[in-house]
Image: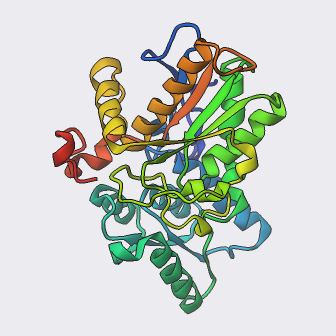
Amino acid sequence: MTTHREPLDSVLDTVGETPLVRVHGSPDAVPVYAKLESFNPGASIKDRIGKYMLEAMLDSGELPEGGTVVEPTAGNTGIGFAVAARQLDIRAVFVVPERFSVEKQTLMRALGADVINTPTDAGMGGAIERARELADELDDAVVPQQFSNPLNAEAHYATTGPEIYDALDGEVGAVVAGCGTAGTLMGIARYAREQHPDTYVCAVEPTGSMYAAKFGSDPDEGDYKTEGIGTHDPATNELFDPDLVDELRAVPDERAHEELGRLAAEEGHLVASSAGAASVAARSVAERAAAGDIDLPHDSVVTVFPDSSERYLSKGIYREFEAWEG
């Protein structure tokens, strides 16, 4: 893992190369390490796909120079695209369901993007539909569509995966990550399986999410407070490949909330609910591996902490669970 020790030309040069840090709530025999993605310039893992996808689409001609990117997003992807768009002379328009973080929407606007809200009850499906309508109305506009665009997963295959393996000298036993679009897990998992075919892969969702339908089961759908991962409409999550997943772990909101509080109080990690859920699942994999219940090619588990809790303070993320708005 490298650090930036020389002056850089652009904020885009600071995307990636984030720290990999031990999670001390994990067993010594099988330690958990977390990739701290809040160290990116836009403070989330979505900076990676913002830079990677826009540059790739410009290079291919899919996105015309000086064109417009229109994206349905819960917020962090919008920030990541907005950081990259302004530096690449691209206009950015984002369609965001109303219930999502006010902080994220404020930051998107601060970065020069236009933000359009859609009704909460229409979910991400409604935001996707509205984004496509807007792209049809605008000249030289494209919808990168993080939920279905292979460039999303490719960004993590090309950057996040190799960084993890470089930091651990290739000794990675398991990969655990939350699934929203599923691009993060799919990209890292594909890279991991190329390094060792027996790498254990665990996908994480909130209880009430419907990813289990991708495995042919009929899960009980419900509301959840954990933000940034999970799905109510698995048909929109086209990047998710069940064949790359050994385990799908549903984490209740209460456990994710408890863990994000523990991570702050005990380990100094100011992370949000998706990281709390990922940490719960990663520690479970590590504990079962340490007990001999799971065979790993190496005695280590890697997870991803996608962003910072500061984006969710207005929703009471550090209040009692009942007062957390989610």
Image side of residue 258 versus residue 234, left or right: left
26 or 309: nearer the viewer: 26
11 or 274: nearer the viewer: 274
Q: Position of residue 209 (x, y in %)?
A: 47, 56
Is 168 placed above or below 102 here?
A: above
Q: In the rendered image, is residue 225 in sight?
A: yes
Image side of residue 253 versus residue 165, left or right: left
238 or 82: nearer the viewer: 238
Quarter of the image for the N terminus: give it. Answer: top right
Q: What residue appears at the point 51 percent right and 57 percent down from the top-left corner?
A: 219
* Structure colour scheme: rainbow
Looking at this view, name the residue that lies furthest to the bottom.
137
Is 49 placed above or below 7 here?
A: below
45 or 214: nearer the viewer: 214
Q: What residue appears at the point 64 percent right and 32 percent down from the top-left corner?
A: 175
All told, the count of numbered labels is: 0
Q: Position of residue 23 (x, y in %)?
A: 46, 20
Q: Where is residue 268 in the image (x, y as percent from the top left)?
A: 33, 22
Q: What residue appears at the point 61 percent right and 46 percent down from the top-left corner?
A: 184
Q: What residue appears at the point 68 percent right and 52 percent down from the top-left corner?
A: 153
Residue 300 figure quarter: top right
Is 99 placed above or below 243 here?
A: below
Q: In the rendered image, is residue 6 in sight?
A: no
Q: Position of residue 13 (x, y in %)?
A: 59, 43
